Structure formats: C-alpha cells, structure tokens
C-alpha cells in the first residue's frame, strides 16, 4: 500500500468519523433547542429571500411560511444528512478495496447500524424519541448517497 493510498484511506475514515460525531452532537440537542435553532435559520433565510426578491407579505403570512418550511426541512433533514453519510461511508469502504455490490452492502450496513444507534441515543434526549420514520429516512438517504457514489 502506497503512502498516498494510506493517506486517502485515513482521511476517508476520518471524514466518516467526524460526520458521525456531528450527527451525534446534533442528535444530543433537546428537541426544543434544535427546533428553535432551525426556526431561526429558516426565518433568516425567508426574510432575506423576500428582501432579495422584493416580495412583500404580511408578518402573519411570513410566520406561516417559515413554519411550513421549517416543518418540511426538519422532516427531510434525516435523509439529507444520511445522504452525505452514505457517500462518505461508501467512499471509505471503496478505499479499503471493496467493490461493486459488496461495497454497497457494507456501506449500507454501516449507515443503517449508525442510524439505529442514533435513534436509540435519542431516547435519552429530552423531547426526542426512537422514530421508525426517521430511521426510514436515514436508510433512504443513505441508499441514494451510496448509489450516487457507486454510479461514479
């Protein structure tokens, strides 16, 4: 194994580990904190999008728009996050020499097991729970991310 390959291998798994730690950190936030944070981001984005486009809506409609966007974003965020994790894990598995369906299966197994551990972890976080629907979104996002890297 060349030094360059060892470096790629190490960096690939380091990226996976750091991303998993970021997921763990975000999952550790109580639901109220996480929701308030995402509401703030969405409100900022909506307000600035309205300014940029010159669109004018009243405060009540802006709050409702922000609420709907936040609700939708939070619903799909598991899929988006695990989409990225799927890509990172599949890349790391390929750096280990696995190819084809074996690489896909190993990467998916890692992502699904991590998703399960993330949902178990959330049982102990205030306002959060183990949700099968979140786990399904994790798996779906992982599959899409893995397939994207596999196709390349």
Image (cartoon, rainbow, N blue to C red):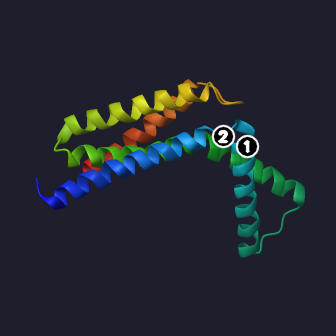
- Secondary structure beneath dot 2 equals loop
Query: Residue 37: x and y, percent?
Result: 71, 50
**Res 32 quadrant in image:** top right
* Image side of residue 90 versus residue 83, left or right: left
Answer left or right for 89 relative to 8: right
Judged from the image, the secondary structure of the residue bearing numbered disc 1 is helix
- Residue 128: x percent and y percent? 66, 30
Q: Residue furthest front?
A: 3
Q: Are marks 1 and 2 in contact (CB under 8 Å)?
A: yes
Please tell me which residue is depicted at 83% across the width and 68% down the height of the picture. Answer: 56
Point out the residue furthest to the left here: 1
Q: Residues within 10 Å of mark 2 (few under 14, many from 20)?
A: some
Q: Residue 33 appears in which quarter of the rendering?
A: top right
Disc ID at residue 108: none
* Left or right of 33, for residue 105: left
Residue at screen point 70% across, 57% down: 41
Res 87 visible: no
Can you give x and y, in whole percent of width and height, for residue 98 in the image?
Answer: 18, 41
Q: Which of 72 and 106 is in front in this view?
A: 106
Quarter of the picture containing the C terminus is bottom left
User: Is 2 above or below relative to 74?
Assistant: below
Q: Which of 73 and 96 is in front in this view?
A: 96
Q: Distance between the residues labelled 1 and 2?
A: 6 Å
Counting from the top left corner in percent of width and height, residue 64 is at 81, 50
Taking the image as shown, residue 97 lies to the left or right of residue 106, namely: left
Q: Residues within 10 Å of mark 1 (few under 14, many from 20)?
A: some
Which residue lies under the disc numbered 1?
Answer: 33
Q: Mark 2 points at which residue?
A: 29
The structure residue drawn at horizontal position 47% and vertical position 32%, both measured from the top left corner, is 115
Does residue 62 lie above or below 122 as drawn?
below
Q: Residue at x 53, y 40 (%)?
A: 24
């Amino acid at each position: 194994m060349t030094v360059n390959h060892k470096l790629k291998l190490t960096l690939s798994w380091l990226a996976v580990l750091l991303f998993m730690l970021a997921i763990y950190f975000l999952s550790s936030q109580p639901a109220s904190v996480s929701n308030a944070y995402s509401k703030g981001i969405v409100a900022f984005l909506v307000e600035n999008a309205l300014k940029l486009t010159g669109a004018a809506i009243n405060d009540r409609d802006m709050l409702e728009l922000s609420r709907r966007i936040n609700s939708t974003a939070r619903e799909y965020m598991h899929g988006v996050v695990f989409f990225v994790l799927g890509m990172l894990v599949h890349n790391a598995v390929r750096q280990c020499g696995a190819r084809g369906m074996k690489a896909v299966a190993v990467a998916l197994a890692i992502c699904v097991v991590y998703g399960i551990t993330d949902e178990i972890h959330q049982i102990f976080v205030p306002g959060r729970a183990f949700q099968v629907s979140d786990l399904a979104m994790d798996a779906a996002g992982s599959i899409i991310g893995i397939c994207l890297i596999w196709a390349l």
